[in-house]
């Protein structure tokens, strides 16, 4: 398990934890023995979208876990190569894994999170709760 660290993000304070962790800390944590894929976080009126660049994986390699307001994205991939020659057998095992944890803002509706993997990109839709969506301005009549 990795330790969450506050990010110094020059935006609204409620987004600080959501946009990730201190990358220096993340690369030096033993849980991240391989490469850590690049991540984009996008916000719109309806919610957020996390895009993880992870080419060469299959959707079955990923695991998404939501516990309280923490979304953990992880993947494991094991490849076996074997070469047989006349007098010996050589086997090489390749193992790659990563894990990223995001602290989601309270505005995200955890029951409606959806994920899709296509063309090497894992896309996770994080819709906002109805009460958190921006409402259009309205005129209030005075009685």
Image (tube, rainbow, N blue to C red):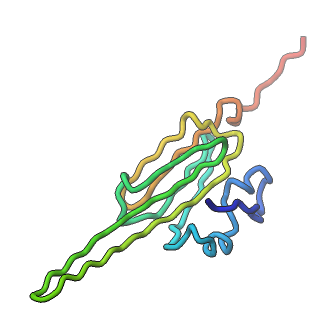
Q: Quadrant of residue 41?
A: bottom right
Residue extending farthest to the top is 143
If the image is split into quadrants, where does the N terminus sit? Answer: bottom right
From the viewer's side, name the closer residue of 7 and 140. Answer: 7
From the viewer's side, name the closer residue of 47 and 120. Answer: 120
**Is 108 left, or right, of 85 in this rendering?**
right
Q: Residue 90: image x %, image y %?
A: 23, 82
Q: Is residue 112 above or below residue 125?
A: above
Q: Residue 11: image x %, image y %?
A: 77, 58
Numbered disc total:
0
Residue extending farthest to the right is 143
**Is 37 left, or right, of 83 in this rendering?**
right
Q: Residue 22: image x %, image y %?
A: 70, 68
Q: Residue at x 54, y 61 (%)?
A: 99
**Is 116 left, or right, of 29 in this rendering?**
left
Residue extending farthest to the front is 87
Q: Residue at x 65, y 30 (%)?
A: 130
Q: Residue at x 36, y 52 (%)?
A: 60
From the viewer's side, name the closer residue of 89 and 122. Answer: 89
Residue extending farthest to the left is 86
If the image is split into quadrants, where does the C terminus sit? Answer: top right
Q: Residue at x 37, y 53 (%)?
A: 59
Q: Residue 25: image x %, image y %?
A: 68, 72
**Is 85 left, or right, of 48 in this rendering?**
left
């Amino acid at each position: 398990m990795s330790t969450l660290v506050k990010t110094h993000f020059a935006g609204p304070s409620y987004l600080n934890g959501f946009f990730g962790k201190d990358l220096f800390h993340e690369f030096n944590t033993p849980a991240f023995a391989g490469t850590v894929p690049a991540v984009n976080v996008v916000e719109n009126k309806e919610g957020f979208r996390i895009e993880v660049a992870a080419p060469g994986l299959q959707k079955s390699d990923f695991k998404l876990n939501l516990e309280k307001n923490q979304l953990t994205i992880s993947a494991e991939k094991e490849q076996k190569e074997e070469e047989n020659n006349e007098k010996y057998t050589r086997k090489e095992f390749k193992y790659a894994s990563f894990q990223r944890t995001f602290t989601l803002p309270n505005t995200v509706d955890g029951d409606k999170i959806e994920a899709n993997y296509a063309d090497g990109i894992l896309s996770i839709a994080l819709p906002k709760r109805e009460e958190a969506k921006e409402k259009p301005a309205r005129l209030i009549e005075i009685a």
